[in-house]
Each structure stands twice: as C-alpha cells, then as structure tokens.
Amino acid sequence: MREVLVVAFGNENSHDLYVAGQAMVHTLRRAGRPAIWGFDTGVFADQRVNLYDCVVLATCPTVLTAEEQKGLDRYIRAGGGFVGVHACNLFAESGYDVFGSTIGSRVRGHSPHGRFRVRIVADHPVTRGLEDFDIEDEMFVTEWIGKPRQVLAAAEHEGREHPMVYVQSLDKGRTAYIALGHDGRAWHNPGFIRLLLEAVNWAGIAGSEEP
C-alpha cells in the first residue's frame, strides 16, 4: 500500500487549510492508511505524483499551472486516485479547462455556515452502510462542468438539492469530490471522516473491477 498525498493550503482567512491538511492526514493514518501532507503542487507536473495511490486536494483558491493540471489529469487517467475536498473547485472562469474537466464542477456560492442534514442518495462503496447525518458546515452550491457525475450524497437548500459527494471514472482512474469540509466542525464530524476514508479507499484502488 503506497502513501496518500494530502495537498492542502490556501490564503483565505476563512479557511485554515494547513490545519485541515494535518487533520485529514491524522484521520487517514489513524485508519491505517499511510499519508503525508504537503503544499507543492509541482508534484503534479512531474513523475513524483506517481509515487502515491491517491491525491487529496484541499485548497482555496485553487492555483494550478497548465502543466500541473495536465499532469494531474494524466496521473488519474493512468490509474491514480483523486479526492477533491470543499473549496478546491473554487477557481477563475478561465485558465482551468483541464482541471475543471477533471474535477467536474465549479463552486458558485454557499449558504451561511450552519447545521444541515447530508442525505445518502446512492448505494456505492464510498457511502455503503453510512446513514444520513447532520453536520455544521458551509453548504456549497456547485455547477457541473460537462455532464453530471454520479451523486452519492446531497443536501437541500432553498428547496433544491445540491451534490455533497459525487464520483466518476476517468479512463483507468477514479475521482471523488466532497463538498464538505469548511473547518474543524466538519473535519472531525464522523460522517465526514467516513466519507473521506471511503473515498480515498475507493479512488486509491483505481483500475480494479468496478462495483
């Protein structure tokens, strides 16, 4: 079993992503998954990313060069795993064509921070056995880039349901996106922890038989 690389950093006052990265690494290690934290997105542009079973990306705002975007996409399509968390799909309208296609959505806004219910809407290895749960978090409103992906969990805001977790396969690789994860109230929520672990487990065995 190779390591999981957690890339977490950001320059917004509202997101302490350095602490988030360390918290997620601790969660993975406690569950027996080797993991390290870093903030060098340059690994996506060279062969170093191939040392890892899965990449977890938690950044805000996302700042990836064109070469890093292409390298991450190549890594996934060759069989790598990818899990995007919370604001990693908050990026400018232009310059993110490759990454936008890879992650599959873009943040358009969010509700005020508060408590809401996450509803499990599909049977899948990432959510199997997990019941609906409540969380204190920002409820992200996203829009699809390209076709809709397979939604596994959702939450309701102003009469509409919004994806909280979705997955897709890209050639030999697998990706998952978890919209949750604003701060410690989310990172330490048992439902979030379960989703993170199972998303990493599912994406990190990319190329195996589909469920």
Image: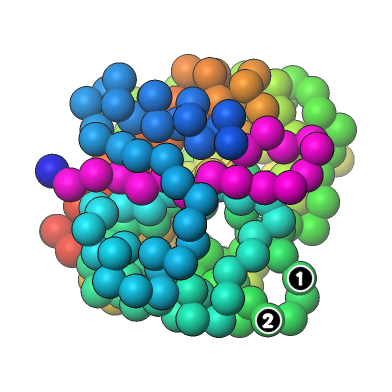
Secondary structure under tag 1 reads loop
Between 182 and 195, the residue placed more toward the observer is: 182
Q: Are marks 2 and 1 in contact (CB under 8 Å)?
A: yes
Q: Is residue 68 left or right of residue 62?
A: left
Tell me the element at label 2.
loop
Counting from the top left corner in percent of width and height, residue 156 is at 73, 37
Q: Amino acid at mark 1?
A: Ala
Q: Is residue 60 visible?
A: yes
Up the image or down, 122 lies above or below 120; here it is below
Give the label on residue 58, or none.
none
Q: Quadrant of the N terminus?
A: top left
Q: Is residue 81 above or below residue 194?
A: below
Amino acid type at image mark 2: Gly
For residue 63, side relative to residue 111 (left or right): left
Q: Nearer the viewer, residue 102 or 147?
A: 102
Q: Residue at x 68, y 81 (%)?
A: 95
Left or right, residue 16 beside residue 203: right
Where in the figure is residue 97, as x and y percent of width and height?
61, 81
Q: Give residue 115's quadrant in the image.
A: top right
Q: Residues within 10 Å of mark 2 (few under 14, many from 20)?
A: some
Per the image, is 83 magenta? no
Q: How many marks?
A: 2
Find the magenta span and give its range: 2-17
Within the magenta stretch, is there residue 14? yes
Residue 144 location, x and y as percent? 64, 67
Kindly identify which residue carries mark 1: 92
Residue 98 appears anywhere in the view: no
In the rendered structure, find residue 95 and report the number of the disc placed on it. 2
